[in-house]
């Protein structure tokens, strides 16, 4: 029996491939970054062929480094940056426009109009989402409206729409399969998470032809075969989930009330709510956690747009650090931020604020401010934004969390993890394998192909590496949070809708 799983982790700044063995151990990995495009203020794009070519390169390198053959790989699992929107020619597979990235704010004005027309509550009830430029639906409408001839071609059945998972499956199967899974579909603002169907009322509202939409599949199950030309023989593609859903699965958050936070380009906090789709009253999203067979489980989610990206900004644009790892030592080198507060709202603010017109702000600067203070403030902002979401989540779910499971690249930063525990007044638990996004995709693909029997077997493999416990008192937490809330109030509603944010 084939004993390896190949997980594809297609992210916002890089494409990765990881080979896991049947014990859940990482055998090899490969990663390739690709170019970010910012054609206008607030716009973010990717070249779809960059996504595909870097992913293909990572696949071949990871398998070569593992020194295994395609015949030894039981299945491929895919996890992807969500909401990023692509449209391509059904016959040739050629994209008709760049991918519009989840961070892009170009459709903020259209979302304002949808809310002004009284559609927000209907959309929330059907999709679990707030009306925001974050999601795929308005991005797809923008492409159809702005690329010459696109709408007519879409109505004629000549074009395919997809999130990144759909794009990869289409390419991996040599243009034979056009699908998505329930998690990615639930992030489009076009999919009814209760009926689990593309919603006709939403399609009419955004003027989306049904002909462009992919078929929606469970997260666990074979959807097609990776073409033999890629690695030498066909391999089942057997697991698909958006990155945060995959991380929830990879953290084995299988019971209602289990929660995890992924620290990546943004931060994404999800709580499993089981078979119940809990409606949020505090600016969170209700989303499908995953689908297995005919059943789905749901989650509450808070999405923070810019966290790790703020550290990249300090490195690349401000040149305050040489690499992300250096931020930890700098943060420890000072006792506090010296009164500096950094609100990294570079592309607006997500949960629980949902303010497309906020912008990045650094407050409290004095002549004595050093780069260490600014770097520490950037790291603290990640934890403070996470706390905002977790407070809202606990109110919605009616539970009080005593622990938070963490993953993603920045979870390796011990300063950040300790500060997170302090500001939450709760335990923060980091697994031995922080590659839980890719691991979740691998678990799903392995479940579908018999590598693992059930979720209980997977849970037994999950090992914790570090536990961070709160070391500060409640008065300190109140002071830090009050200062943060003042800073957020300064950053909010900075732009006017006619100042280029749309």
Image (tube, rainbow, N blue to C red):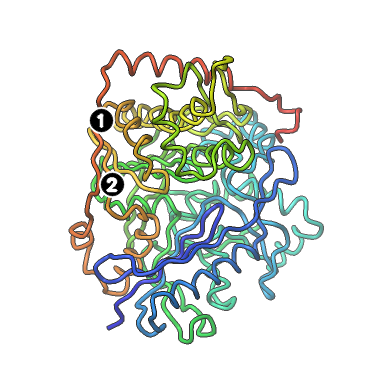
What quarter of the picture does the C terminus occupy? Answer: top right
Q: Which numbered disc, 1 or 2, marks the residue closer to the eye?
A: 1
The residue that mark 1 highlights is 426
Taking the image as shown, residue 178 lies to the left or right of residue 117, namely left
Q: Looking at the picture, how far across and down is residue 188, in whole percent? A: 54, 49
Packing grade of label 2 (10 A; few <14, some 14-19, many >=20) is: some
Callout 1–callout 2 Cβ contact below 8 Å: no
- Nearer-the-camera pick, 114 or 172: 172
User: Is 371 or 178 nearer to us in this picture?
Assistant: 371
Residue 372 is tagged as none
Q: Position of residue 151 (x, y in %)?
A: 74, 57
Q: Position of residue 240 (x, y in %)?
A: 43, 63
SS state under label 1: loop
Q: Mark 1 Cα within 10 Å, few/some/many (few <14, many 20+)?
A: some
Identify which residue is drawn at 26% across, 40% down.
Answer: 257
Q: Where 398 sits versus 489, above or below? A: below
Label for residue 274? 2
In-image side of 410 versus 463 (left or right)? right
Q: Residue at x 75, y 28 (%)?
A: 499
| View extreme (right): residue | 148
Q: Residue at x 56, y 57 (%)?
A: 163
Disc 1 versus disc 2: distance between alpha carbons? 23 Å
Q: Quadrant of residue 302?
A: top left
> The N terminus is located in which quarter?
bottom left
| Closer-to-camera residue (12/236) | 12
């Amino acid at each position: 029996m084939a004993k390896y799983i190949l997980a594809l982790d297609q992210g916002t700044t890089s494409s990765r491939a990881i080979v896991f063995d049947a014990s859940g151990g990482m055998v090899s990995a490969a990663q390739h970054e690709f170019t970010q495009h910012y054609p206008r203020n607030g716009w973010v794009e990717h070249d779809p062929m960059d996504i595909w070519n870097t992913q293909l390169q990572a696949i071949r390198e990871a398998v070569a480094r593992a020194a295994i053959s395609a015949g030894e790989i039981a299945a491929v699992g895919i996890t992807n940056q969500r909401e990023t929107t692509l449209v391509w020619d059904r016959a040739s597979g050629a994209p008709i426009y760049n991918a519009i990235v989840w961070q892009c704010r170009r459709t903020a004005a259209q979302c304002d109009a949808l809310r002004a027309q009284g559609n927000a509550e209907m959309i929330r009830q059907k999709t679990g989402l707030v009306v925001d430029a974050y999601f795929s639906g308005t991005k797809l409408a923008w492409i159809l409206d702005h690329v010459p001839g696109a709408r007519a071609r879409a109505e004629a059945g000549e074009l395919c729409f997809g999130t990144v998972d759909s794009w990869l499956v289409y390419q991996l199967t040599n243009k034979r399969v056009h699908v998505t899974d329930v998690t990615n579909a639930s992030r489009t603002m076009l999919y009814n998470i209760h009926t689990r169907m593309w919603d006709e009322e939403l399609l009419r509202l955004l003027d989306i032809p049904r002909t462009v939409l992919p078929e929606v599949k469970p997260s666990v199950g074979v959807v097609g075969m990776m073409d033999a030309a890629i690695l030498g023989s066909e391999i089942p593609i057997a697991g698909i989930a958006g990155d945060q859903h995959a991380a929830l699965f990879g953290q084995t958050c299988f019971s209602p009330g289990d929660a995890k936070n992924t620290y990546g380009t943004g931060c994404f906090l999800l709580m499993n709510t089981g078979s119940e789709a809990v409606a949020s009253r505090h600016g969170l999203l209700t989303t499908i956690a995953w689908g297995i067979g005919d059943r789905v489980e749901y989650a509450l989610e808070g999405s923070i747009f810019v966290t790790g990206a703020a550290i990249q900004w300090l490195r690349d644009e401000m040149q305050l650090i040489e690499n992300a790892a250096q931020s930890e030592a700098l943060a420890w080198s000072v006792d506090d931020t010296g009164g500096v507060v950094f609100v990294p709202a570079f592309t607006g603010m997500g949960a629980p604020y949902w303010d497309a017109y906020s912008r990045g702000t650094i407050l409290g600067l004095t002549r004595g401010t050093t780069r260490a203070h600014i770097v520490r403030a950037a790291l603290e902002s990640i934890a403070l934004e996470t706390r905002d979401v977790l407070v809202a989540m606990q109110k919605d779910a009616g539970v009080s969390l005593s622990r938070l499971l963490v993953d993603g690249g920045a979870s390796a930063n011990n300063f950040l993890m300790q500060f997170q525990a302090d500001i939450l007044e709760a335990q923060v638990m980091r697994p031995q394998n922080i590659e839980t996004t890719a691991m979740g995709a691998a678990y799903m693909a392995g479940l579908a192909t018999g590598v693992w029997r059930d979720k209980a077997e997977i849970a037994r493999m999950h090992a914790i590496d570090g536990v961070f416990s709160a070391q500060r008192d409640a008065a300190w937490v109140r002071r830090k949070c009050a200062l943060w809330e003042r800073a957020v109030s300064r950053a909010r509603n900075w732009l006017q809708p006619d100042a280029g944010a749309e």
